[in-house]
Amino acid sequence: MSPLALTPSLETNRIHLMPSMRTPYWLFVVLILLLGGLQYRLWVGEGSIAQISGLNRQIAEQQGENQRLLERNRILEAEVMELKQGMETVEERARQELGMVKEGETLYQLSE
């Protein structure tokens, strides 16, 4: 037997190598597509960085609004307590908002 008969021809080697080279190529393409899909979701899709940034901005705005409303509520609560405790505040409001006067008082209205 000759040494050439024992070694496979170059054509046979090429045929056997081609399918094994294609498998990693397709795997590489699939991985690239998967990576692209994940990147799309990260930057554009639901739960993306842009959406989370927008939600964080809305949360900050809402917290500011909540603080403003809490302060307004504290002021109103103090005013209610003052109205419940003394008549001076009630009289002051009646004078300012309703234009009322006490008995025995004379109202002088100056016009310019």
Image (tube, rainbow, N blue to C red):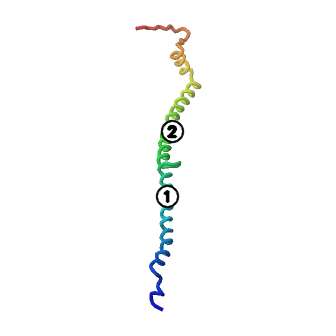
What is the x, y in percent for residue 50?
47, 46
The dot on residue 33 is: 1
Relative to 39, say whether 103 is above or below: above
Residue drawn 50% across the image and 71% down it: 19
Q: Amino acid at mark 2?
A: Gln
User: Which residue lies at the image location 49% right of the left edge and 58% below the top edge?
Assistant: 33
| In this rendering, the label closer to the viewer, 2 or 1 | 1
The residue nearer to you, when weighing 97 against 47, is 47
Residue annotated with mark 2: 62
Snapshot quadrant of residue 88: top right
Outermost residue, left side = 112
User: For the point 50% across and 49% down, which residue is it?
Assistant: 48
Dot 2 alpha-carbon crowd within 10 angstroms: few under 14, some 14 to 19, many 20 or more: few
Q: Mark 2–mark 1 contact, CB under 8 Å? A: no
Disc with the residue nearer the chain's start (2 vs 1): 1
Pick whichever, 16 or 53, lies toward us. Answer: 16
Callout 2: SS: helix
**How packed is label 1: few (under 14 Cα within 10 Å), some, or many (20 or more)?**
few
Residue 111: mark: none
Q: Of 26 and 102, which appears nearest the observer?
A: 26
**For the C terminus, which image quadrant?**
top left
In this picture, is 77 found above or below 7?
above
Relative to 27, residue 42 above or below:
above
Residue 109 versus residue 35: which sits nearer the camera? Answer: 35
Numbered disc 1: secondary structure: helix
Q: Horizontal and vertical percent for residue 37?
A: 50, 55
How far apart are the alpha carbons under marks 2 and 1?
39 Å
- Hey, what amino acid is under mark 1? Leu
